[in-house]
Image: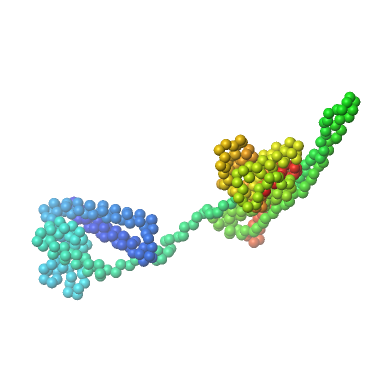
């Protein structure tokens, strides 16, 4: 009997769990319907779990009900689960639990579980009342359950009722791009500045070697001349003032973010300065040159590039080692989108990486940069382009302000770009 008592207790608990799980399904659907929206992914997953659990519970309920029937040599589940006979009204002809005042009263959970089982499983209804009365018993149980459903006022719990349990989702990652790249600066010859000036030697005259006309006659008599050129570096500075609270409580780190953004601003300023130097100090324009309409085909690009290389070769007497094609963003993407209908190329064409604005073309290194003005295309020798900069630039500076609970911050760097031989560069656009 102790075993059957345990079975009965488990059957009652499972029936209760099934009802509560069904109510959770209804509450979830009601919430979505009230807010006039589709179910969220997490809600659909939860509903699937609820329905799966109900199926598991119903299977075990059926098994436990059969265990009780076998133990009592009876399939009358109502009698097995009922701890006391139900109060009858209307003469007890249909076994209703409705008193004269019209309010349905289930005195035990077993009475409620009996009706649920009878309505859900026809075989149980037949065992309770026999085949002849099966329909009548099921209708009476269904009527009682409907009365109970109308009497109950289910209170919905919405997200607006539990705002304190739903903290907002906060991403501790900056959803932006911080780009400190300087492609043109990186392509130049680098010099560490130890002072505010950049000094370099420049050849102004070369010795000549000529064929001697006759014995004991002069031939090449030109002397070598070298001058020292000096340029003054420019200083780039940015500053700010952060409170102690901002530095200590921020996520992500506000102090590090400030330095990252200031470093990006420094990079863009110095890259633009380097591009400006290339654009203004370079040589003239080659022939043929590219147009400005942006409709040049492959042959026009090829002719302009080779014409620029030939022009530098002629101007420098064949000394320049032209190796780089500098392009503004609009020209880079125009070149990247240019195709050839020619089946055979005498020399290799190359390839461009549009994501990094780098690549090769006709043996030249291609460098595209945001720092150039539009419609810029320059060919030249990168070794004739100097960039002087203080070591570690931009240098980060911090000054604590204990009297006001803050910190002054800044970045600083000295920078200078210089084309020291304009004959080694030429514009092709």
For this orientation, the residue located farthest to the bottom is: 101
For this orientation, the residue located farthest to the right is: 216
Task: Please state if 421 lies on the left or on the right of 346 as rendered.
Answer: right
**Based on the displayed image, in which of its 4 quarters is residue 33 positioned?**
bottom left
114 shown above or below 200: below
- Residue 253 visible in the picture: yes
**Residue drawn 22% across and 52% down?**
59
In this rendered view, identify the residue nearer to me: 117 or 284. 284
**Residue drawn 61% across and 53% down?**
261
213 shown above or below 359: above
Task: Please state if 173 lies on the left or on the right of 329 as rendered.
Answer: left
**Residue drawn 60% across and 48% down?**
334
The number of callouts visible is 0
In this rendered view, identify the residue nearer to me: 384 or 321. 321
Task: List x then y, in percent, for residue 305.
Answer: 66, 42
359 shown above or below 53: above
Task: List x then y, in percent, for residue 7.
Answer: 20, 53
**Residue drawn 59% across and 37% down?**
345
Task: List x then y, in percent, for residue 4.
Answer: 17, 53
**Based on the displayed image, in which of its 4 quarters is residue 365 positioned?**
top right
Task: List x then y, in percent, for residue 374.
Answer: 65, 52
For this orientation, the residue located farthest to the top is: 215
Task: Please state if 159 lies on the left or on the right of 129 as rendered.
Answer: right
Task: Please state if 14 lies on the left or on the right of 32 as rendered.
Answer: left
- Residue 385 visible in the picture: no
């Amino acid at each position: 009997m102790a075993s059957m008592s345990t079975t009965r207790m488990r059957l009652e608990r499972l029936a209760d769990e099934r009802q509560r799980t069904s109510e959770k399904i209804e509450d979830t659907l009601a919430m979505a319907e009230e807010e006039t929206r589709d179910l969220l992914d997490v809600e659909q997953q939860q509903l699937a779990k609820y329905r799966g659990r109900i199926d598991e519970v119903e299977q075990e309920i059926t098994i436990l009900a059969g265990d009780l029937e076998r133990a009592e040599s009876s399939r009358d589940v109502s009698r097995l689960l009922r701890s006391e006979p139900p109060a009858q009204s209307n003469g007890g002809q249909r076994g209703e639990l409705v008193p004269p005042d019209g309010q349905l009263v289930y005195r035990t959970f077993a009475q409620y579980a009996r009706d649920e089982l009878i309505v859900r499983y026809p075989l149980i209804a037949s065992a309770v009342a026999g085949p002849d009365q099966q329909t009548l018993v099921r209708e009476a149980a269904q009527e009682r359950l409907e009365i109970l459903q109308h009497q109950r006022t289910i209170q919905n719990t919405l997200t607006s009722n539990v705002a304190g349990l739903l903290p907002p989702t906060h991403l501790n990652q900056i959803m932006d791009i911080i780009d400190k790249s300087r492609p043109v600066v990186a392509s130049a010859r680098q010099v560490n500045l130890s002072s505010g000036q950049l000094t370099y030697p420049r050849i102004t005259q070369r010795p000549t070697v000529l064929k001697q006309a006759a014995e004991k006659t002069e031939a090449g008599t030109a002397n070598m001349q070298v001058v020292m050129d000096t340029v003054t570096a420019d200083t780039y500075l940015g500053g700010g003032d952060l409170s102690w609270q901002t530095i200590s409580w921020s996520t992500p780190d506000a102090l590090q973010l400030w330095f990252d953004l200031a470093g990006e601003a420094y990079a863009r300023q110095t890259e633009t300065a380097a591009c400006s130097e290339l654009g203004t100090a370079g040589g003239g324009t080659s022939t043929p040159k590219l147009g400005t309409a942006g409709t040049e085909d492959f042959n026009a690009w090829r002719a302009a590039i080779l014409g620029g290389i030939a022009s530098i070769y002629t101007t420098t007497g064949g000394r320049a080692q032209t190796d780089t094609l500098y392009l503004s963003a609009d020209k880079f993407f125009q070149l990247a989108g240019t195709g050839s209908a020619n089946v055979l190329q005498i020399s290799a064409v190359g390839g461009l990486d549009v994501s990094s604005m780098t690549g090769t073309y006709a043996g030249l290194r291609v460098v595209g940069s945001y720092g150039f003005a539009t419609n810029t295309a320059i060919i030249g020798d990168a070794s004739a382009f100097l960039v002087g900069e203080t070591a570690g630039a931009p240098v980060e500076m911090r000054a604590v302000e204990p009297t006001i609970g803050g910190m002054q911050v800044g970045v600083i760097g000295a920078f200078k770009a210089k084309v020291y031989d304009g004959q080694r560069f030429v514009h092709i656009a």
